């Protein structure tokens, strides 16, 4: 059974279901790091999808433009998000393989 093992965050924060995070793994990592609840992170992912934001988007600025992980300066913060995204990507791949196997 596929299991999500995040490197940080609490259980009420994670939006691991691919249908809910819409592939915006960095938005999830950003939200979890800020301490946001899952419902807010899920809304942010939906907004990112509606805006056709880049997949490496982390949040929408007040000016309406999506900021990306590439704009961050802190190497430790970037690595932290990369680790989270890698775990989320592994989970999504494992889940997809599990679903294919069930068919």
Image: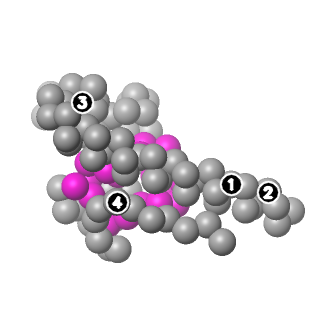
In the displayed structure image, the side of residue 11 where residue 22 appears, left or right: right
Which quadrant, please, contains the C terminus? bottom right
The span picked out in magenta is 13-33
Measure the alpha-carbon separation of dots 4 and 1. 21 Å
Image point 66% across, 72% down: which residue? 1
Measure the alpha-carbon separation of dots 4 and 2. 27 Å
Q: Which residue has dot 2 on it?
A: 100
| Residue situated in front as seen by the camera: 94 or 22 | 94
Query: Which mark is first along the chain, 1 or 4?
Result: 4
In the displayed structure image, the side of residue 64 where residue 99 appears, left or right: right
Secondary element at image label 4: loop
- Whether the magenta-drawn stretch holds residue 21 is answered as yes
Circle number at residue 67:
3
Q: Which residue has dot 1 on it?
A: 96
Measure the alpha-carbon separation of dots 3 and 4. 23 Å
Q: Which residue has dot 4 on it?
A: 7
- Whether the magenta-drawn stretch holds residue 28 is answered as yes
In the displayed structure image, the side of residue 74 where residue 94 appears, left or right: right
Residue 46 location in percent, x, y?
Answer: 41, 47
Confirm or deny contact between disc 1 and disc 2 (CB under 8 A): yes
**Label 2: how many residues lie within 10 Å, few (<14), some (14-19) or many (20+)?**
few
Secondary element at image label 3: strand
Query: Which mark is first along the chain, 1 or 3?
Result: 3
Nearest to the eye among marks 3 and 4: give it: 4
Nearest to the eye among marks 4 and 2: give it: 4
* Displayed quadrant of residue 69: top left
Confirm or deny contact between disc 4 and disc 1 (CB under 8 A): no
């Amino acid at each position: 059974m596929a299991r999500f093992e995040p490197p940080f965050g609490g259980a009420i924060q994670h939006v691991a279901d691919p249908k809910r995070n819409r592939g915006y793994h960095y938005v999830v990592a950003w939200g979890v790091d800020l301490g946001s609840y899952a419902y807010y992170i899920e809304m942010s992912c939906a907004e990112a999808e509606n805006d056709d934001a880049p997949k490496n988007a982390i949040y929408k600025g007040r000016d309406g433009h999506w900021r990306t992980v590439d704009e961050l300066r802190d190497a430790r913060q970037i690595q932290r998000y990369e680790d989270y995204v890698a775990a989320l990507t592994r989970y999504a791949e494992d889940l997809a393989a599990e679903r294919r196997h069930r068919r």
